[in-house]
Amino acid sequence: MPLDAAAIMTRTVVTVGPDDAIAVVARMLTEHGISAVPVVAPDGALLGMISEGDLMRPFGQENALRRDWWLNLIAEGTDLSQEFLDYIRLDRHRARDLMSPTVITAPDTASIGELADLLARHHIKRVPILRAGKLAGIVSRADIIRALARSDTAAVPQP
């Protein structure tokens, strides 16, 4: 029997909600030793993915330049705008603010080959698996490699 996503996926997926604070997301990633997590609505619908890279975005150079611009305005005595106050209060960011809403997904019937192609083509490390439009699991590169290692029918492509 060929291996498909349902056979190799991790079924107990660590997820966060769209309203979870960024500190909660960071804690989930750290506690579970993962680099990204699906953002899921209460009904199980996949809303996006949030990764370590997404969490780092507010601290990047582009935002530092914007922050310097705002600080110059403050130094000149300009009133603080609500946008600036929101920007400097990182505790107000939620998962929905930093997540990537466009997510590459696969059905639970996808073959190992289809999954491997998706991961390679899109340069991603994991793919959420959907069943009837809801998150059913997740398949990582490591899951595919483990499945291939267990399979006695795994064919190694010849150069």
Image (spheres, grey):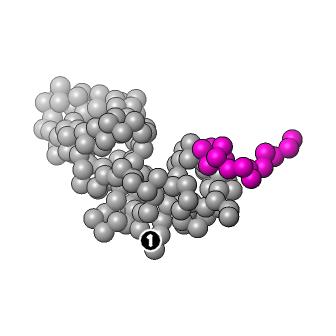
Residue 99 visible from this viewpoint = no
Q: In the picture, residue 123 is in which quadrant?
A: top right
- Residue 8 spot, x, y in % from top left: 55, 55
Residue 74 visible from this viewpoint = yes
Residue at (51, 55) in percent of width and height: 9
- Residue 32 spot, x, y in % from top left: 36, 39
Disc 1 designates what residue? Answer: 133
Q: Nearer the viewer, residue 90 or 105?
A: 105
Q: Nearer the viewer, residue 65 or 135?
A: 135
- Residue 134 lies left or right of residue 121; in this view the side is left
Q: Nearer the viewer, residue 104 or 153?
A: 153
Residue at (42, 63) in percent of width and height: 135
Above or below 15: residue 135: below
Residue at (28, 32) in percent of width and height: 67
| Amino acid residing under circle 1 | Gly
Residue at (39, 54) in percent of width and height: 12
Identify the magenta region.
145-159
